[in-house]
Image (cartoon, rainbow, N blue to C red):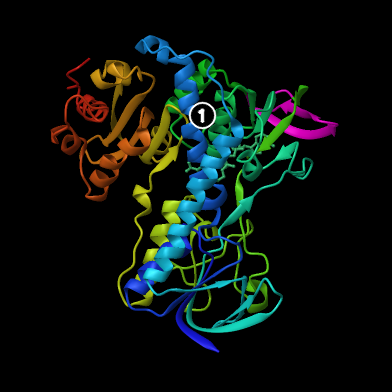
Amino acid sequence: MQSFDLVVIGSGPGGYVGAIRAAQLGLKTAVVEKDPTFGGTCLNVGCIPSKALLDSSEHFSVANHEFAAHGIGAKDITIDVPTMLKRKDKVVSDNTNGIAFLFKKNKITSFRGRGRLKSATEVEVLKLDGTTEILSAKNIMLATGSVANELPFMKFDGKNIISSTEALTLTKVPKKMVVIGAGAIGLELGSVWQRLGAEVTVIEFATKICGPMDAGLSDRLCKILQKQGIKFILGAKTTGAQTKGNFTTVQFETVADGAKQTLEADVVLVAVGRKPFSEGLGLEELGIVKDARGFVTVNEHYQTKFANVFAIGDLIPGPMLAHKAEEEGVAVAEIISGRPGHVNYETVPGVIYTWPEFSAVGYTEEQLKASQVEYNVGTFPFSANGRARAAMQTDGMVKVLAHKTTDRLLGVHIVGPRASDLIHEAVVCMEFGGSAEDLARSFHAHPTFAEAIREAALACDGRARQM
Ligand code: NAI
């Protein structure tokens, strides 16, 4: 029997990053992966392929709608969907091969097959050829991620009613697409197919888009996406769907008054959240506790009821984000090695990769009001930012929230160009316990999109200069 200091089950961002950190710290490490390639949902059917399609479709949209204003003539712009998908697949394989390379480089042993806890110190690997192998493990990290939620009255059929996985592989642009759920997946993949020509309608249960993100900026993004052509039906609950031939009729009712309506679509993307994936892991047999929603219960050191069996990422409560899983994987590797592994959940950034993008870190105004924290707010629109004007990217704004008396930075929210990259100066500032004044006094090169953050920080104290 092969024995290891750490056996990681799952090779998504949490598992593979945690395994690499463990190997760097000198632990003899193995990773067990059931899928043919490493990388989990994020690399294979999530973050990476969706960003590849978002970039392709954004180029198409810019060529169609913005080139003319730049004086660039481009007639009869077409989209060749199979070529776009081929490029996306290459991006994915380059990334997943990169992990295989990193495993080799760090002397991590990988096993192909389904991992299951046989005991608190043994992992059984059910291999593709049907044979099993038992690995002896001093420590085990469960990093099996999550799967898409299914609506019971609207089961996935992979063709008309699809999850995000199939929405990444449609071989032609649907004529009419209905998206259920205005969270990150619905808005990102809805954007991809809308830019390419689909008529997209998003049905959302809540009265706002973007889940718990800042309400004011969510509304602003909603208006921008509507201007781009996406239709939103908010405050509406999907109740059923019937597929006849190539068409699906989606039934929904308005939450406020129960009024029933229907919509026709050739593709329905169901994006109503994800749930932890722990089936077949052997948790029940060992009495490892899960909560009512299926999340594995762990203590602040990510330990289950067994001190040497850890769980991280989408399998445990918290935001279902690749970078949150990564940090937890690193923390576990460090804890096992006797170091103080720690994750600061106050500064986890969130991004929705529409265009413009929506990013945030820290508290929203709604959260601060609910917890009666007094704050100053400073805002700055990209329409007043020189670089944004030069780039014709003036949609959106920055909102900075700082404590009323201490000026400590409590939250930064951005709808705007490259918001996904811009947010990180706020993350670092908050990590250091910085203030709005710290952001405002730090150099920002001119002209850059980032100056909008500085102006919003200045505006917390009524000192914005460019407005
Ligand atoms: P989500 O939880 O973010 O949003 C789902 C939305 O569906 C909610 O707004 C909910 O109110 C709505 N909904 C639920 N049932 C409904 C019904 N019957 N009818 C109408 N609306 C309904 O889930 P999503 O977008 O599927 O994403 C899953 C997870 O993956 C999230 O945790 C998300 O953060 C993560 N993710 C993150 C990305 C990013 O960081 N850019 C990209 C993609 C996913």
Q: Is residue 380 left or right of residue 246?
A: left
Q: Residue at x 49, y 59 (%)?
A: 313
Which secondary structure, mark 1?
Answer: helix
Whether residue 9 is visible: yes
Give the extent of the magenta segment. Answer: 233-257
Q: Give residue 318's position: percent from left, percent from top.
A: 48, 53
**Quarter of the render that holds ligand 1:** top right
Left or right of 20, for residue 37: right
Asked where in the image residue 286 lies, by quadrant, the reply is bottom right
Q: Is residue 71 above or below residue 369?
A: above
Q: Which of 41 and 459 is in front in this view?
A: 41
Image point (55%, 24%), residue name:
195
Given residues 34 and 346, the one toward you in this image is 34
Magenta span includes 279: no
283 versus 433 height, above or below: below
**Quadrant of the frame with the N terminus:** bottom right
**Which kind of residue does numbered mark 1 sit on?**
Ser
Residue at 60% over, 40% down: 168
Question: Relative to 443, is 57 on the left or the right?
Answer: right
Q: Quadrant for the C terminus, please.
A: top left
Q: Nearer the viewer, residue 273 or 193?
A: 193
**Residue sticking out furthest to the right:** 244
Q: Mark 1 points at which residue?
A: 57
Is residue 363 visible to us here? no
Q: Where is residue 33 in the image (x, y as percent from the top left)?
A: 56, 67
Give the image location of residue 306, x and y in percent: 52, 78
Does residue 304 appear left or right of residue 347 in this picture?
right
> Within the magenta stretch, is there residue 235?
yes
Looking at the picture, does residue 348 appear above or below residue 127? above
Name the foreground residue: 288 vs 280: 280
Residue 436 position, x and y percent, is: 21, 35
Q: Residue at x 35, y 32 (%)?
A: 418
